[in-house]
Amino acid sequence: MRTVELSRSPETRQFGPLQGKCCVMPGDSISGTLFFGGAGIDGSYIQSIVSEMHDAGISSAVFVDRDKWSGGTVLDALVGVRFAREYDPNFPLMLRANSRPGEQFNLVGYSYGSLLAAQVAAKYGLKGTTVHHLVLIGAPISQTFLNLLRKTPAIKKIIVMDLDEHGDPIYAGIPYHEVASSSPLLGYQMARQEGHFYYSVDGETGKRRHGELASYLYDQGLR
C-alpha cells in the first residue's frame, strides 16, 4: 500500500508540484491522512491542526503543499469555491507517492479545502480506491455532489461538520446563491476569527480548538 505526499513544513518543498513520484492512480491502494486547509492553504492554524492530530493519535496526518493545491486566497475563495463545490469528473490533480506509514486513507478538509478533499475522494473512490474517512468541515459543497459521495461504496465514512453552532452561514448542501449572499457576513467573521473561521485561530485559543477537533476525529475512528 502506498502513501500520499506532502509537506510537514511550509519551508520544505520535498514533495512540491514538480517533485516526488507521480502518480498514485485512481483505483490504487493508498494510506495516510491528508488535511486540506481553507482558501490559500497558508495559515499557521494548518500546522497546528496537524500537530494536534498527531498528539491525538492520528499519526499519519500531513498537510498538503499549497503550491500544488492552491491558486492563492482570493482565487480559491472566488473561483475555486464556485466550481469545486460541484463534482468535476475532469478534476486534474493527482496524488504523489511517498513512504509515510498508515493503515487508513483519510481526507480531511476545512472550508475551501473540504471541496478539494471531496474532489479527491470522488476521483479516487469512484475508481475503487478505499477512502476510510472523508471529513468535511464548514463545507460549501452542493447537495448533488454530497449525495454522489454518499453513494460511492469505496468511501466508507463521511463526517460532515457544519459550524452552525458558531454562527457559520455555510453548511453542506448549501445552494450557491446562499454562498454568494453570505459574503458580507463571512468577511465580518474572518476579521474576528469566529463563525466560519472558528478553526483558523492562532495562539492558545486556536490550540485548544484544534485539540478538540483532533480528539473528535480520533473518536470518530481516524488513525
Image: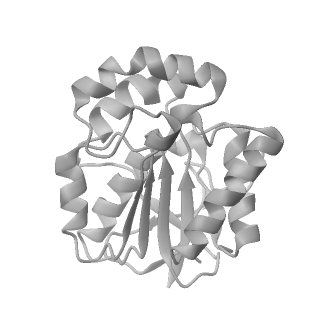
Q: Is residue 30 above or below residue 204?
A: below
Looking at the image, residue 28 sits to the left or right of residue 201; the answer is left
Q: How many marks?
A: 0
Percent x, y for residue 165?
A: 48, 42
Looking at the image, residue 154 sits to the left or right of residue 63; the answer is left
Q: Is residue 14 visible?
A: no
Q: Residue at x 63, y 81 (%)?
A: 101
Furthest-right residue in this view? 204
Q: Is residue 123 above or below residue 24?
A: above
Quadrant location of residue 216?
A: bottom right
Quadrant location of residue 176?
A: top left
Furthest-top residue in this view? 184
Q: Is residue 58 visible?
A: yes
Percent x, y for residue 22?
A: 48, 63
Nearest the eye: 26 or 119: 119
Q: Residue at x 27, y 38 (%)?
A: 174
Image coloring type: one colour
Quadrant location of residue 51?
A: bottom right
Q: Residue at x 57, y 75 (%)?
A: 219
* Image quadrant in which the C terminus is located: bottom right
Percent x, y for residue 218?
A: 60, 73
Q: Residue at x 36, y 26 (%)?
A: 79
